[in-house]
């Protein structure tokens, strides 16, 4: 059976274990059902997620010209403290920026390779944690806009990590942490503007990933360079497919690539 389509991050369902779905224009694959099967990947071409053209993908699934033009790739996406919609100030498209920035946001702690702080829209909980491969997470504050979440994250980054080590996450070389204690420890470093939004009474959310075998030395597949790859799928964590030979393939970082997928 063969399927073809442009890669976008896998859709997920919060269950035990997490359910993963790869959505193409004409196909819909429950990836959990492919675990234990031989998978064949083939790079076909590029397809920018914005303009749809066969142009080399620059970042985040967009070609270079789209990346530097569209609001979905503006700096405030990765650096929420740069958000300005609450000031009625446009960056690239004020209507879009108001829609995204002026809604409830969560500052959270997640434990994937280590305890890290992050920001997401409230509507993206727990999806964001799943995408990061976190096995436990907890909310710290819930604020009414992206800017407040951003300045809170910046303040807390002095006391806790803000990056995930993807190799450690995939090896499952993790230490369980008491995130309630972490949350309380960091409370005093929340900026004054966000202190009233502190969440005092909540518990950790735990994630269980569908993995039969974790890699000891994960090696990342560059499908653009290799052209093709075949291997037995043994697990999925974060947005990574994990194969028996310790190859891993990050769906998220390959958005905008058209691939053909064969299943034995």
Image (spheres, rainbow, N blue to C red):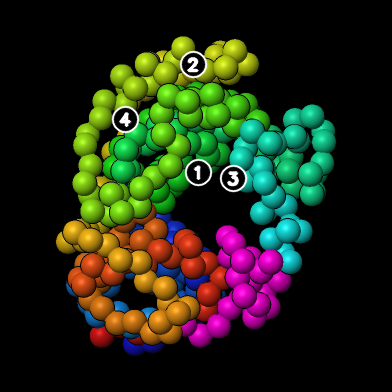
Can you identify the residue that label 1 sits on? Answer: 124
Residue annotated with mark 2: 189
Structural distance between the alpha carbons of marks 2 and 3: 22 Å
- Marks 3 and 1, Cα distance to the nearest angstrom? 15 Å
x and y percentages locating residue 2 in the rendered image: 38, 86
Judging by the rendered image, the residue that carries numbered circle 4 is 204
The tag earlier along the polypeptide, 3 or 1, is 3
Q: Are marks 3 and 1 in contact (CB under 8 Å)?
A: no
- Residue depth check, mark 3 versus mark 1: number of the one nearer the observer: 3
Which residue is drawn at the image coordinates 63% and 46% (left, top)? 77
Residue depicted at 52% across the width and 36% down the height: 119
Q: Residue at x 23, y 53 (%)?
A: 171
Give the numbered dot on residue 78: 3
Q: Are marks 2 and 3 in contact (CB under 8 Å)?
A: no
Q: Secondary structure at mark 4?
A: loop
Stretch of the chain drawn in magenta:
42-64
Q: Secondary structure at mark 1?
A: helix
> SS of the residue at dot 3?
helix
Residue 56 among magenta residues = yes
Q: Can the viewer see residue 158 in this picture? A: yes
Between circles 2 and 1, the one closer to the viewer is 2
């Amino acid at each position: 059976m063969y399927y073809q389509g442009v890669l976008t991050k896998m859709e997920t369902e919060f269950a035990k274990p997490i359910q993963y779905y790869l959505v193409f224009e004409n196909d819909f694959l429950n990836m959990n059902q492919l675990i234990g099967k031989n998978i064949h990947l083939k790079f076909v071409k590029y397809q920018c997620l914005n303009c749809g053209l066969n142009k080399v993908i620059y970042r985040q699934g967009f070609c270079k010209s789209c990346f530097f033009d569209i609001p979905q790739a503006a700096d405030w996406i990765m650096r929420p403290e740069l958000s300005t919609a609450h000031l009625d100030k446009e960056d690239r498209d004020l209507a879009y920026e108001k829609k995204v920035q002026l809604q409830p946001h969560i500052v959270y702690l997640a434990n994937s390779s280590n305890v890290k702080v992050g920001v997401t829209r409230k509507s993206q909980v727990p999806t964001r944690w799943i995408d990061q491969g976190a096995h436990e997470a907890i909310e710290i504050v819930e604020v009414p806009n992206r800017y407040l979440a951003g300045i809170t994250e910046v303040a807390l980054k002095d006391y806790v990590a803000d990056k995930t080590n993807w190799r450690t996450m995939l090896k499952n070389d993790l230490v369980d942490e008491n995130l309630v204690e972490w949350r309380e420890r960091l409370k005093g470093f929340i900026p004054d503007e966000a202190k009233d939004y502190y969440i005092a009474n909540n518990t950790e959310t735990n994630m269980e990933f569908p993995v039969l075998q974790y890699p000891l030395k994960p090696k990342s597949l560059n499908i653009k360079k290799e052209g093709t790859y075949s291997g037995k799928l043994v697990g999925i964590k974060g947005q990574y497919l994990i194969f028996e030979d310790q190859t891993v393939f990050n769906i998220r970082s390959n958005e905008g690539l058209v691939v053909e997928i064969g299943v034995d």
